[in-house]
Amino acid sequence: MRFPGRRKHKHYFPVNARDPLFQHAGLSLPKAKTHVVGIDQTLVDIDARIPEELLTRYQLPKGGSTIIASDVAARLYEELLAEKLISYEFAGGTVGNTLHNCSLLADEASILLGVMSENIRLGTSGYRYLSNTSSRVNLDHLQPVDGPIGRCFALVTPDGERTFAISAGMMNQLRPESIPEAVFDNASALVVSAYLMRCQPGEPMPEATIRAIELARARSVPVVLTLGTRFVIAERPEFWRNFIQANVDILAMNEEEGEALTGAADPLIACDRALELTSLVLCTAGPVGLYLAGYSDDAVKRETRYPLLPGAIPEFNRYEFSRPMLRAKCEKPVRVFAHIAPYHGGPTRITSTNGAGDAALAALLHDMAANRYHKSSVPNSAKHVRDFLTYSSMSQVCRYANRVSYEVLVQSSPRLTRGLPEREEGLEDEKYWAL
């Protein structure tokens, strides 16, 4: 396990140099293992820069996410190809992006559940998906299907607005019996997407998702939900509030999805309201930056050493040095908030925002996996006096997520193509990577 950030403190590292008392007593612990499990609609992202009239001709609502028929997808693809409007084609899917990034950051395995074309030829969507996915992502449990996986067209108009057109193919044909129980043993999280519950009648993906959630909760594995787009949530906001309250421990969203879910346009207030439904909320808010909201126990809350920030909740970051916990495990729960502005003010030029939120979530999952790994390796460490969700403080997780998200914004691919670069001298404070 590669631990998050560049840390100069060695009190807990490396984990193979454990407490001398353990070594003196001749005690040894089994090698720790952990991984992240995710379910996704396996698809390929096709990014194109288009004129607005194309949306009208294909009856695609601007800024929305629309399912299109296979024949329509074929015509759209041929037109984009003929007019040379395609910028790139990459493996996509919000959960697939997240697992790829998490494995790249942690240098550890993750397990993807979904479908894959049984017969794959060069140049097909299945081929592109496999070739653009980290070898650290375990694809052995994918269910074979007789047909293509999905294609997601990200159509960017001159004003920068993204409109999604999705050709489902066979991507929603994952059956409940294809979810193996064993993959949830030693898992640090299960990641699902709101898209998985938005299928055509008769498609088995929603039932497969519910089965995975039940298996995870039976093993006390935190369930993470990423909301997708505001249109998915706005269709059935009450359904999603009930679903989150019943099944979800950690919620990932952007400010628009947060407003659709909670009715609050201010991302801080949206996070606060979302804490009535779940235990930890990650909210990306574009040029405003990134918020993290959660619970910690009153006895272990820690005050920040940074300036207190104004906002809809005055001085909301007072306890941002705390580490988050599940609300149910807090004796006296306290709401804790953290925020960070875009790294270096944000990129000077953004090619695409597609995948930036997935990158931020990957950083949070990496920190959660590091916490579980460390707890298994050094169980008596002071880091584990309570059952915390993350290895780092909420402030530190914000900084890490912000940095990873920046790395996706400065490239074309919605997935990381490399690990984080070395720290730029003179541009980052040492506190950035401190414990």
Image: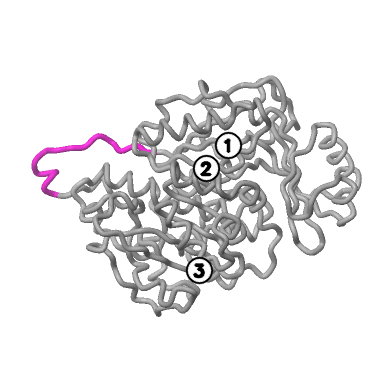
Task: Label 3, secondary structure: give it.
Answer: loop
Q: Residue at x 34, y 67 (%)?
A: 321
Quadrant in which the C terminus is drawn: bottom left
x, y percentage for residue 94?
60, 45
> Dot 1 lies on which element?
loop
Separation of residues labelled 2 and 3 (CA atoms) = 27 Å
Discs 1, 2 touching: Cβ within 8 Å? yes
Question: Of the residues shown, which amino acid type is indicated by label 2?
Answer: Leu
Q: Quadrant of the N terminus?
A: top left
The residue segment tinted magenta is 20-34
Work out how far the residue at label 3 is from the one at label 1, CA to CA, in angstroms: 35 Å
Are discs 2 and 3 less than 8 Å apart at CB?
no
Q: How far across and down, in percent of the image, does residue 246 sit?
A: 44, 42
**Residue 110 colored magenta?**
no
Question: Which badge, 3 or 1, comes first in the chain's sequence?
Answer: 1
**Front: mark 3 or 1:** 1
Which residue is under mark 3?
424
Going by the image, does 25 lie left or right of 376? left
Of the image marks 2 and 3, the number of the one nearer the N terminus: 2
**Which residue is the site of mark 1?**
40
Q: Residue furthest front?
A: 238
**Relative height, residue 405 to residue 100 (above, below):** below
Whole-percent x, y for residue 314 in the image: 43, 77
Mark 1 vs 2, N-terminal side: 1
Q: What residue is disc 2 on? A: 99
Q: Residue at x 44, y 41 (%)?
A: 247
Question: Which disc is residue 4 wearing?
Answer: none
Relative horizontal placement of residue 275, taking residue 240 as reference (left or right): left
Label 1 Cα neighbours within 10 Å, binned few <14 / some 14-19 / many ≥20: many
